[in-house]
Image (cartoon, coloured by chain):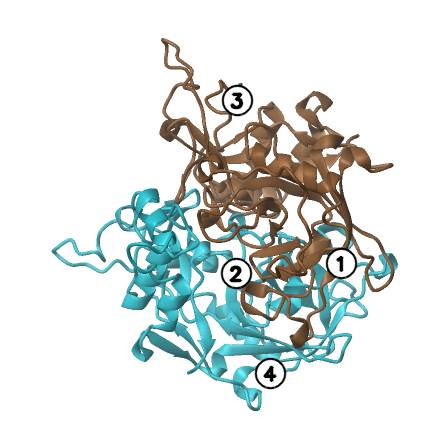
Chain colours: A brown, B cyan
Amino acid sequence: MRNQLLPLAIIALAAATPAQPQASAAIAAGKSQPSPLAPGEIVAAAPKADWTAIAASDLLVMDLAPDAKGKPRRVVIQLMPAPFSQGWIGNIRKLAAAKFWDGTAVNRVQDNYVVQWGDPDAEDKVKAKKLPEGLAVMPESDYVERLTPIKTKTPTARTKPATERFRKDPYGNNLFGLGWPLGAADYSLWPVHCYGMVGVGRDLSPNTGTGAELYVVIGHAPRHLDRNIALVGRVIEGIEYLSSLPRGHAALGFYDPAQGDERTAIQSIRLGNEVKDLPAYEYLSTESASFAKYADARANRRDAFFIRPAGGADVCNIPVPVRRTQ
Amino acid sequence: MRNQLLPLAIIALAAATPAQPQASAAIAAGKSQPSPLAPGEIVAAAPKADWTAIAASDLLVMDLAPDAKGKPRRVVIQLMPAPFSQGWIGNIRKLAAAKFWDGTAVNRVQDNYVVQWGDPDAEDKVKAKKLPEGLAVMPESDYVERLTPIKTKTPTARTKPATERFRKDPYGNNLFGLGWPLGAADYSLWPVHCYGMVGVGRDLSPNTGTGAELYVVIGHAPRHLDRNIALVGRVIEGIEYLSSLPRGHAALGFYDPAQGDERTAIQSIRLGNEVKDLPAYEYLSTESASFAKYADARANRRDAFFIRPAGGADVCNIPVPVRRTQ
């Protein structure tokens, strides 16, 4: 999927506006006007047309062993759409079809960082589970997606340099596209490490990982990992079953049974279209007017609790709304 | 503590440098030169003089009820130094001295947001625990600390506008000072909501909270809360006992016993100087050469795992190192 012409409608992060403490104090006191809508209220009011369905075949459904009280623990992951990380995602589809993860476990929980799962014996040449045939070996260049510039004669929003259009942060330029938070530079795009994003564990470069070992971010966005690891999706339901697991006691939060750590077993991981009675999901289109309003409200909280809108928000503090289809 | 002349040595966040994928690929392969130090290695090598002791009287020690296996769960919080949030911190000292929190509980755990504790019956006029006498009622203006500009004739780093000196992010300007991550504008400073920071729960404005209800950030930095709530400290040990608690099922992650949520009891909260055998702690001075090197390495990871340094880091992705005194 190189050099394609990507039909990517993109929106800038909400522009900074000056804080208005007096006005919003009046609002908070409820004296002069009703509170502006909170971000969640904007999402709830978004018309059906602003939501995009997620295909069941783009979901990965992980069933952990039930908890101590016997309650099921299901985690639902949305895989990224083309053109992002498609080689690794192809591998993940093969691994799920081969039932590779059934009987594996969560092996690492590092506070304010990641939960990671896969074969606990992957490093052991004798005990390691056999990987399915035909997994792609992906190049590091595929951490970033390069796009063909769209040539027009008039400088439209699409051809203006990214530096003018999108909010900057210390990592560079960011935007939302196709439902995902992205980094952007010089007609290159890449997914970024926000809370809940799912990535591919790997060994030292030039290894890029197969996809058999996956992790999810459970802390402050580790943006230093952007373009250094393949991101393949995000948790859209049940992240609390991973983020609330006990932290591991070995280095980097790996579980160490000798120190009393107990791995959480994975019963199965399947593609969504293989799972019976799975709800349907949809996300708020990042190209919709509702998303623009929502992003603006995230950056400028004027609902009753707030006295001073921030005037901005970082790309990971504007999580893309996802819900069961209504 | 208004209008004081603050002896604040401050350092800019590491300046962006271009990514060097070729150079670092060679480093990763271990062919030409040893890997540059990882941030943790820089911290480990910092000379003793670069560390600042934390007074036991500036610690707040929370002992939760032991876990299901009977293991103790202690959380250690460092209170912020003057001039930040001192009115609320004065209240917190009174609440600890009065043993107000003994027998209260963790009442709220919202995924990717906060863990909150205090009197579960605080809203119930009959059952609510009595607050100690003499708690200060703090004004909203104290969310921000205003400083007197230091007047000199030559434009030194200290008198240059903050916009020139400090890395920007979508929330404005940031810096490190006195061991803490801070927001800055026009000779104003305020603490910012990074992972692990502790703040004061409050009702709608103009209520500013007493300090009896506290929360800790357990997700991506909710920077929209900056200057809207008082921050009073940060967890320096044991945050995993809070961040791994089960999430609550009521709105905003509040615990709802009717839905099976079980509150975690707080045995006691005491100031550190009231606790026997408490270890001593120290933080890496944010004004030290070691911290500057550490911040630069956080923004430009060139240790073996990385192929492409980010060239920047946000203020919450450079956590101030804190350790038991060595």
Asked if the residues shown at circle 2 and circle 4 are in contact, with their CB atoms under 8 angstroms apart, the answer is no
Asked if the residues shown at circle 3 and circle 2 are in contact, with their CB atoms under 8 angstroms apart, the answer is no
Q: Chain of mark 1?
A: A
Q: Which residue is mark 3?
A: A8
Asked if the residues shown at circle 4 and circle 1 are in contact, with their CB atoms under 8 angstroms apart, the answer is no
Asked if the residues shown at circle 3 and circle 4 are in contact, with their CB atoms under 8 angstroms apart, the answer is no
Identify the element where label 1 is drawn. Answer: strand
Between residues A309 and A180, which one lies in front from this camera angle? A180
Closer to us: mark 3 or mark 2?
3
Counting other residues with Cα less than 10 Å from the Cα at mark 4, is it few (<14), some (14-19), or many (20 or more)? some
Between residues A23 and B94, which one lies in front from this camera angle? B94
Residue B319: x %, y % from top left: 45, 61
Q: Chain of mark 2?
A: B
Residue B119 visible, this orientation: yes
Q: CA distance from mark 2 to mark 1?
A: 41 Å
Q: Quadrant of the C terminus of chain A?
A: top right
Residue B3 visible, this orientation: no
Q: Which residue is mark 4?
A: B97
Q: CA distance from mark 4 to mark 1?
A: 45 Å
Residue A71: x %, y % from top left: 85, 56
Q: Amino acid at mark 4?
A: Ala
Q: CA distance from mark 2 to mark 4?
A: 21 Å
Q: CA distance from mark 3 to mark 4?
A: 59 Å
Q: Which residue is mark 1?
A: A265
Closer to us: mark 4 or mark 1?
1
Q: Which residue is mark 2?
A: B230
For this orientation, the residue located farthest to the left is B153
